[in-house]
Image: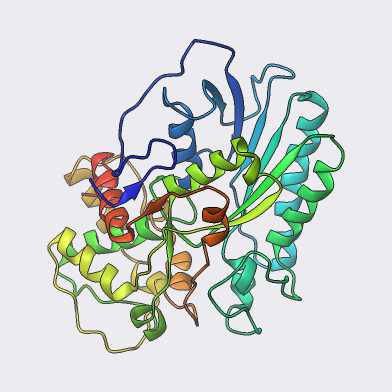
Amino acid sequence: MGGWYSWWTGRIGFDESQGEIRDNGRPKVALVIGITGIVGTSLAKILRRSDAPGGPWKVYGVAVGLSRGGLQTLLLSTFSAISTEERNCHDNGKMFQNVLDALLPNAPRLQHIVLQTGGKHYLGPFALAGKIPAHEPPFKEDMPRLPVPNFYYTLEDILFKTVKKKEGLTWSVHRPNAILGFSPWSLMNILGGLAVYAAICKREGLPFRYPGNRATWEQFGDASDAELIAEQELWACLDPNGKNQAFNVSNGDVFNYKRVWHLLAGKFGLEVAPYNGQPISMKEVMKNKGPVWDAMVEEHDLVPTKLDDVGNWWVVDFTLNTPAPMISNPNKAKELGFLGFCNTETSILHWVDKMRCKKIIP
């Protein structure tokens, strides 16, 4: 499948080959915090390939069982959703600090820490979206922080303080926007929620109505493929140009949800309902659809899941009702040597196919 360029292989197309860790030489060790998330899943897959850059790699998803002193790379991509941003700062910051406090004394070979945050670095937290002056897109990495609490800032400050404690320890921060990928366990899987909604509309004969605002329907933003993000994070671990830097990471093109809706309609055999410009709450639309999903799981022999396992509706509502498009400038990473890109439409179709292949959706 075309439309996706791998940074290290120089090949176009999603590559599904599954190599094993090579046994020639001592493997590097990576600990991925958030390995069951969208990007964590893709990162673990890439690291375990036989041709992974810098390999062979030994990959751990949790600290249990790590051989003392062997860890070389820590990659953090996780999020705990709390009701207020102050609590987000405290709880997510504490989680990150606990990981670092446990690892640093026991990992003398630790060389690099990757922290993944996102576009809210430039817009502010969910609760303040549209209520505070945010940066104008396209977003650049050197834009100043907004004068509001933001747990991304908290995580960065913890990271910067930590790396000063160990000579030679380097870091990188990666800021994707809407992430396209697959993980049945991810809190932030916007595409998974939309695919489930489309599948339910197909089964029940419901109009495939766009639930978001006119801004996201018509205006252009950008997205970030999970495998592209994972590749950039691995590049930053290995390339001197990627160290001690923050990077935007996006596919390199733009999209709007009008086009996404037509892509999903074609994939599920639906007609796109006329858009009337009035947002509807996906949380309300889906609140009584649990029994419908249970029946679909049984009828199609899907992986046993509940509706709330495969669709996080507040995330869908927020993403489709942002007041302004999110577009990041990806040139900094390109100028320093990371040349990967991805066709967003190709990415959407690929990940829907992956969800079907894994029996998550019919």
The residue at the point 77 percent across, 36 percent down is 169
Q: Nearer the viewer, residue 12 or 68?
A: 12
In the image, 97 versus 69, the foreground residue is 69
> In the drawing, does residue 186 fall left or right of residue 282?
right
Residue furthest to the right: 165
Q: Residue at x 78, y 44 (%)?
A: 97
| Image mark count | 0
Q: Say whether residue 233 is left or right of residue 96.
A: left
- Can residue 248 be seen? yes
Question: Residue 165: x and y, percent?
Answer: 87, 39
In this picture, is 16 found above or below 56?
Answer: below
* Residue 273 occupies quadrant: bottom left
Colouring: rainbow
State the quadrant of the N terminus.
top left
- Residue 34 seen anywhere in this rendered image of the structure: no
Query: Residue at position x 73%, y 17% from top?
Result: 68
Q: Is residue 140 left or right of residue 347?
A: right
Q: Is residue 42 above or below residue 315?
A: above
User: Farthest residue toward the top?
Assistant: 24
| Rendered location of residue 61, percent (x, y) | 56, 31
Q: Position of residue 301 (x, y in %)?
A: 21, 40
Name the residue rendered at 65%, 32% in the picture.
Answer: 73
